[in-house]
Amino acid sequence: MLIEKVINVLNIDDVITICGAYDKNIELLQRQYNVVILVRGNDISVSGEENNVKNAVFAVEALMKMIDAGETINEQVMSYVYTLVLDGEAEKITEIGANGICVTVSGKTVKPKTIGQRRYAESLDKNTILIGIGPAGTGKTYLAVAMAARAYKNHEVNRIILTRPAVEAGEKLGFLPGDMQNKVDPYLRPLYDALYEMFGAETFQRLMEKGTIEVAPLAFMRGRTLDDAFIILDEAQNTTREQLKMFLTRLGFNSKMVINGDITQIDLPDSKRSGLVDAIRVLRGVEGITIQKLTDKDVIRHKLVGDIIKAYDSARKKD
C-alpha cells in the first residue's frame, strides 16, 4: 500500500543539513529505503510502500536527533542510521549524545560516534579496568588514547603508559633493524598517531622526554607497579595468558587500565592460547572490570570496512 508521511522540521537550518550538499543525503535516503522524498520549506514529505516509508521516517527523525546532539551528518552517519533502522533500534540513537571526551590540538572534539562507542567510553568511568573487544575500525585505540589524554589534562593521573605486544604477522623484534626504539616504533604507530592528535607533536615529544608519556613493548612492564597512571594495552589478542596476567597485576593505586584487542586477528603461534581470550573467560563478573564488545556496526572507517568484516565473519563461521 502506497502512503505519504510529512515530517515538520522546526529549524530550516536542520532541513538544509538533512538534505546535504546538492541534496546528496536525500538521494541516499531515497536509495536506501526505496521511497520518494520531497522537501517543501520546513516539511519533508516521504512517500512509497508503507514499510519503506515507516523506516525512512525513522531515519529522518534519527538524523534530527543527531543534529540536535551536535553530530555532523555525513555518509558514514547515514549508513549507521540505516543499520539501526533495519535492526529496529532507531530509538537508541539518542544514546550517542553530544558529550565529548576531549579536544584535539586542532580544536576537534573527540566523541563517540556510535552507541557501542559511547558504552565503551562511559564504562571506564564506572570501572578501573576496561577490556575492549572489536574488529578493526571501531575506534578502540583512538578512544582509549582520547580518554587517557582527558585524564591527564584533568590531573586525574600523572602519566600515560602505552604498550603493545611485539608480535605481528610473524615478525619479532630481533629481526628488525635499529635500536630498541626503532624496533618498537612500527608496532606502536597507531598509538603515536592518536597522541599527536591529542597533544600536538611538540608537546608529545616534551612529555615523552619527561617520562610523562611512556610508550614501550609489553615485556618492559614486568616487575613494575604503575601508580597514578592511565595504562593502555593495545592488540591484546597477541598476548599469551602469562603476559596478560603479568600486565594486569601491574595495576597500582589511582590508575586506570584499558585492554584492547580483536580476537579474530590473533597472530600468535598455533600452540599459544591468546591471553585476551582467556581473560574474557576468567575475568567476566569480577567487580571493577568491564568487558565491552564492539561490532561491525561500530566501524567508523569506510563503509566497505564493515562489509569486509561481515564477509570474513561469515566465511569463518562456515569453515
Image: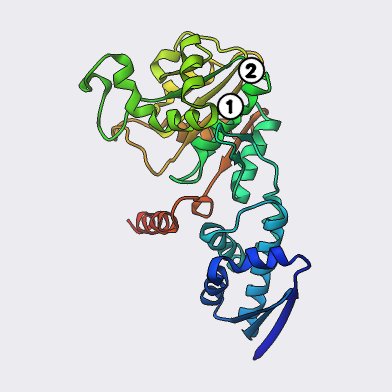
* Residue 212 place in picture, x, y as percent: 53, 14
Q: Is residue 211 above or below residue 237?
A: above
- Which of the 4 image quadrants contains residue 303? bottom left
Mark 2 is surrounded, within 10 Å at the Cα level, by few (under 14), some (14 to 19) or many (20 or more) other residues, namely many
Q: Is residue 129 above or below residue 205?
A: below
Q: Is residue 277 above or below residue 71?
A: above
| Residue 88 visible from this viewpoint | no
Disc 2 or 1, which lies upstream in sequence? 1
Residue ID for mark 2: 157
At 29% across and 35% down in the image, what residue appears? Answer: 270
Task: Residue at 30% x, 19% y: name it.
Answer: 182
Mark 2 and mark 1 residues within 8 Å of each other at the beta carbon = yes
The residue lying toward the viewer, choosing from 77 and 310, is 77
Q: Quadrant of the C terminus?
A: bottom left
The tally of labels here is 2
At 44% across and 40% down in the image, what residue appears? 262
Q: Who is closer to the viewer here, 232 or 25?
A: 25
Residue closest to the far right: 10
Residue 251 location, x and y as percent? 57, 17
Q: Which amino acid is tagged 1?
A: Ala
Left or right: where 37 falls relative to 95: left
Task: State the image quarter where residue 131 is shown.
Answer: top right
Residue denoted by label 1: 148
Kind of residue at disc 2: Val
Q: Nearer the viewer, residue 314 or 88?
A: 88
Which colouring convention does the figure follow? Answer: rainbow
